Amino acid sequence: MKTGSKTSGQATVLYLQRDESLTHARFGFIVSKAVAGAIGRNLIKRRLRAIAKEILENHPKGFNAVIRAMPEAKGFEWNRLHQEVLSNVNAALSK
């Protein structure tokens, strides 16, 4: 998280580090107790994993990414969260 690029939106912060030696992309997720209770955190993690799976289909290799959910994420619907994460990834990959 210290090296690489950082992009953020209202509900998420994305840390992306390029590594062309990787044969596949890797994702990590941070959803703290400040975001929601256990059920809410698990819902957000499931949504983020589904979004990451879609990103892996389009950008299959060459980076490590960590997505941190902010407390505002609990109020976001699927489409809004999906659009924010995709725009963050595209912005970070274009840097």
Image: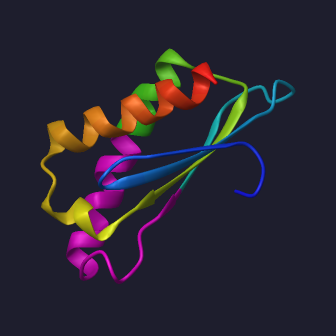
Name the one closer to the observer, 68 or 28: 68
Q: Nearer the viewer, residue 71 or 79?
A: 71
Q: Is residue 92 above or below residue 12?
A: above
Please tell me whether residue 49 belongs to the stretch shown in magenta: yes
Q: In this rendering, would 8 be left or right of 51? A: right
Dividing the picture into quarters, in which one does residue 92 lie? Answer: top right
State which region is magenta: 29-50
Residue at image coords 27%, 80%: 38
Q: Does the magenta segment cover residue 46? A: yes
Q: Is residue 12 left or right of residue 59?
A: left
Q: Which corner quadrant of the image does residue 61 belong to?
A: top right
Residue at image x 29%, y 49%? 47
Identified at 60% across, 25% down, the residue is 93
**84 vs 33: above or below:** above
Q: In front: 23, or 7?
A: 7
Q: Nearer the viewer, residue 53 or 86?
A: 86
Whole-percent x, y for residue 4 in the image: 73, 43
> Where 33 sits versus 94, above or below?
below
Q: Position of residue 58 (x, y in %)?
A: 49, 16
